Amino acid sequence: MQEMHVTFLQAAIISIWVAMVMSRGLGGATLTLRFTPMMTGLIVGVVFNDIPNAMITTAAIQLIYMGVFSPGGQMPSEPAIATAVAVPVALLGNMEPTAAVAVAVPVGLLGSYLYQLRFFFNTMIMKLTERYAQEANSSGLTFSIIILPIICSFALFVPFMFVALYFGAPIIADVIKSNAGGVVFHILNVIGGGLAAVGIALTIYVIGKKSYIIFFLLAYFMAVMAKPLNITMVTYAIVGAIVAFIFVLAKSEAVNSAADQPRNNSNNNNQDDDDY
């Protein structure tokens, strides 16, 4: 059997990327990058030179994070960390995307504890920030508020992610691949499929209105019926835009009609008064 491995460079690049995302080292945009696995999945695909399979796996992981909230910036599971480990495992072990989802969940949960540890380090830095604020030291505030937290995040996330990728990912992939077709592999697929369904259900519950559920059902059954036609996502997007335009047009017409009704009634009453 060919030995599975993650190279030193691959592990280092992905580790640095995750540290940049978790530390917001790329600016405000990293807040969005932290809450979604899609960009991290793309980076993993580029590093492993397998973007299509990486994005297919990442799309399955994305489903479980749909509708997940982050009160106070804290998430129950970290999507970027989960994707950075689960996608390489899936690529190394030739796993189904649903099986990779089951790997992503515990890794993401461990990542949330790591993020809480980062908060603890930041509270220690706050004392330095308060001192610089009392001294009105602008350069010191920049160092304690921006630079020092980024350094602490890199010191925390880079070693963790590097060890998880360089040593852990090949072992997990080897175990799963050796049990391919067995009970463990079947359980991972079942759990992964169920978690994706939960993510979709949460999204519908959070952002969906009962009157709009019909559009979700329409899109679902259209996708099922049109699957043999191999229709691209661009075509689906165009059809969705047309349906949305028709809905908005019909709704605006209904509102205009409702607004014109009192005006027509008023004109009729005035005409009756004139006749009288």
Image: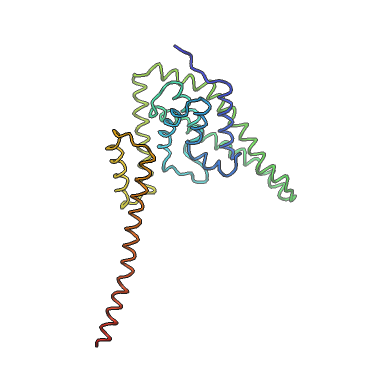
Which quadrant would residue 26 be assigned to in this image? top right
Q: Is residue 42 above or below residue 249?
A: above
* Residue 107 percent coordinates (x, y): 48, 30
Depth order, front residue of 219/143: 219
Total marks placed: 0
The residue at the point 41 percent across, 18 percent down is 177
Of residues 83 and 145, the one nearer the viewer is 83
Quarter of the image that includes the N terminus: top left
Residue drawn at (43%, 18%), measured in percent from left and top? Answer: 175
Q: Residue at x 40, y 37 (%)?
A: 63
- How far from the left and from the top, in percent, is residue 259? 33, 69
Spot occupied by residue 237 in the image (x, y as percentages of width and height): 38, 43
Tell me, yes or no, if residue 178 can be seen here. yes
Q: Nearer the viewer, residue 236 or 214?
A: 236
Compared with 157, 269 (above or below) is below
Q: Quadrant of residue 174?
A: top left
Spot the residue most to the top: 1
Left or right of 102 on screen, residue 149: right
Structure colour scheme: rainbow
Looking at this view, is 39 or 100 the one in front? 39
The image quadrant where one finds the C terminus is bottom left
The structure residue drawn at horizontal position 52% and vertical position 39%, both measured from the top left corner, is 33
Tell me if residue 78 can be seen.
Answer: no
| Residue 92 image point, x, y percent | 46, 21
